[in-house]
C-alpha cells in the first residue's frame, strides 16, 4: 500500500509522465523512497523541499545508488557477486528493452523510468556502476587523482544526474553540480573513516597519509585501539580543507537552478557542510565513534527552507496563471 504522501508526489509527476500511473512502476518508486528515507536521512529531508512532482525521481536516483552500494558496503552481509549480476542485468535491460522496462527488480525499473523522463546519459550510470565494482577489489588509492576517478563515478555523476531534475538555468551549473557531488562524498569519507576501515578500505590517499608520516597500517591500528592519534586528526583536517574548497566552488551553483529547486539544493549543501562542521568540532575524533548531526540542527536548517520553497512554488503558480 503506497502512503498518501507518496501517492500525491507520484500523481503530480504523472501529469508530465503518464507511465507513473502504472501500479507496478509506482510501487517501484515507493521502494526507492523507502531506501532513501531509511539510509539517506540528511538528503531525504532536503528532498521534501522540492515540488512534489520532482521528488519521485530523486527517490529513484538515491535508491538506485543505495541499492548498488549495499551489495559491497554492508557490514553484515556483503555480496559482491550479486552486485556484478545485478549491474549486468540492468545494463542488459537498457539494451534489450525499450527504456529499460525489462529491469528485473523495482529499483532498476524506477531508475530506467527516471533516465527516460530526464534523458539521463547512460554513460553516467555506467560510470557509477564501475565505481561500485571498484569497491570489490580496490581497498585504497595511491594519489588524490586516483581517488577522484573513483569519486567521479560514485558521486560526481549523481550530482550530474540530479541536475536535469533541478532544472539548470545555465550550462555553468554542471561543473558546480559535479563539485557538490564530490564534496558530499568526501564529507562521508572524512566522517566514516572508521566504518570504512571495518570494511577493509581506506579512502585517504596514500600520498596524503605519507605527508603526515602515516601508513594504512597506522589507521587500522588506531581503529583497533579505538583512538584517533594527532597525526590522523591532522590528515583528516587536510582532507576536510580540500572538501571545503569543493563546497566553495559549488556554492554559486545553488542559484543556477530553477527557483523551486534552490531551497532543496541549499539545504542539502548546508546539512552536509554541517556534517563536516560537526567532525571539525569533534576534533576529527572519528575512529572511536561516528559523528552525527542531531535532528534539531537538521530541522533548524530545513524548516526555513521549507517555507521559502513553498513561497517559490506559490510565486511560480501565480505567475504561470497570470500569463
Image (spheres, rainbow, N blue to C red):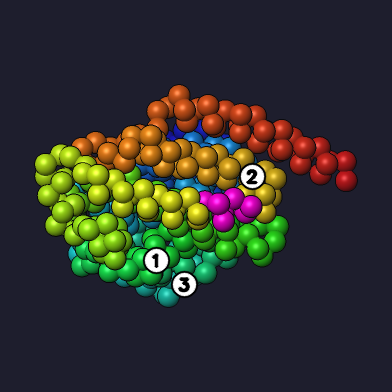
Q: Earlier in the sequence, mark 3 or mark 1?
A: 3
- In the displayed structure, 188 sits above or below 182; it is above
Span highlighted in magenta in the image? 247-253
Q: Nearer the viewer, residue 309 or 319?
A: 309
Tell me the quarter of the picture where residue 109 sits.
Answer: bottom left
Dot 1 falls on a residue whose secondary structure is helix
Mark 1 surroundings within 10 Å by alpha-carbon count, few (fewer than 14), some (14 through 19), many (20 or more): some
The tag on residue 45 is: none
Count every numbered label the image shows and give the total.
Answer: 3
Q: Which residue is mark 2?
A: 262
Dot 3 falls on a residue whose secondary structure is helix
Q: CA distance from mark 2 to mark 3?
A: 26 Å
Answer whether labels 3 and 1 touch (C-beta < 8 Å): no
- Residue 37 in picture, x, y percent from top left: 41, 38
- Residue 160 in picture, x, y percent from top left: 53, 61
Q: Nearer the viewer, mark 1 or mark 2?
A: 1
Residue visible at 74% across and 35% down in the picture: 314
**Is residue 233 in view?**
yes
Dot 2 falls on a residue whose secondary structure is helix
Q: Nearer the viewer, residue 35 or 210?
A: 210
Q: Which residue is mark 3?
A: 123
In the displayed image of the protein, which residue is found farthest to the top? Answer: 296
In the drawing, does residue 257 fall left or right of residue 159? right
Residue visible at 43% across and 65% down in the picture: 152
- Residue 130 in picture, x, y percent from top left: 34, 69
Q: Nearer the viewer, mark 3 or mark 1?
A: 1
Instruction: Give the overall secondary structure of the magenta segment.
Output: helix
Amino acid at each position: 500500500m503506497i502512503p498518501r504522501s507518496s501517492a500525491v508526489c507520484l500523481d503530480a509527476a504523472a501529469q508530465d509522465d503518464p507511465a507513473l500511473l502504472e501500479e507496478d512502476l509506482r510501487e517501484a518508486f515507493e521502494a526507492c523512497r523507502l531506501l532513501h528515507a531509511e539510509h539517506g536521512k540528511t538528503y531525504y529531508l532536503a528532498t521534501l523541499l522540492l515540488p512534489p512532482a520532482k521528488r519521485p525521481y530523486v527517490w529513484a536516483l538515491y535508491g538506485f545508488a543505495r541499492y548498488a552500494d549495499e551489495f559491497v558496503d554492508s557490514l553484515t552481509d556483503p555480496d559482491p557477486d550479486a552486485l556484478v549480476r545485478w549491474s549486468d542485468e540492468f545494463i542488459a535491460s537498457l539494451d534489450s528493452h525499450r527504456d529499460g522496462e525489462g529491469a528485473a527488480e523495482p529499483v532498476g525499473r524506477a531508475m530506467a523510468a527516471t533516465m527516460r523522463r530526464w534523458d539521463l546519459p547512460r554513460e553516467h550510470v555506467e560510470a557509477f556502476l564501475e565505481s561500485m565494482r571498484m569497491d570489490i577489489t580496490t581497498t585504497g588509492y595511491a594519489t588524490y587523482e586516483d581517488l577522484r576517478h573513483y569519486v567521479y563515478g560514485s558521486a560526481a555523476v549523481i550530482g550530474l544526474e540530479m541536475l536535469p531534475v533541478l532544472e539548470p538555468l545555465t550550462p555553468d551549473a554542471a561543473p558546480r553540480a559535479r563539485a557538490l557531488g564530490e564534496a558530499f562524498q568526501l564529507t562521508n569519507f572524512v566522517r566514516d573513516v572508521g566504518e570504512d576501515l571495518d570494511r577493509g578500505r581506506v579512502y585517504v590517499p596514500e600520498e596524503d597519509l605519507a605527508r603526515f608520516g602515516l601508513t594504512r597500517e597506522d589507521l587500522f591500528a588506531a581503529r583497533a585501539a579505538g583512538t584517533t592519534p594527532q597525526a590522523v586528526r591532522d590528515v583528516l583536517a587536510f582532507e576536510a580543507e580540500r572538501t571545503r574548497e569543493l563546497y566553495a566552488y559549488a556554492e554559486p551553483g545553488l542559484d543556477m537552478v530553477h527557483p523551486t529547486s534552490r531551497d532543496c539544493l541549499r539545504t542539502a549543501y548546508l546539512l552536509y557542510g554541517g556534517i563536516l562542521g560537526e567532525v571539525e568540532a569533534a576534533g576529527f575524533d572519528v575512529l572511536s565513534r561516528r559523528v552525527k548531526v542531531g535532528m534539531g540542527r537538521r530541522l533548524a536548517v530545513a524548516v526555513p527552507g521549507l517555507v521559502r520553497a513553498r513561497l517559490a512554488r506559490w510565486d511560480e503558480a501565480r505567475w504561470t496563471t497570470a500569463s
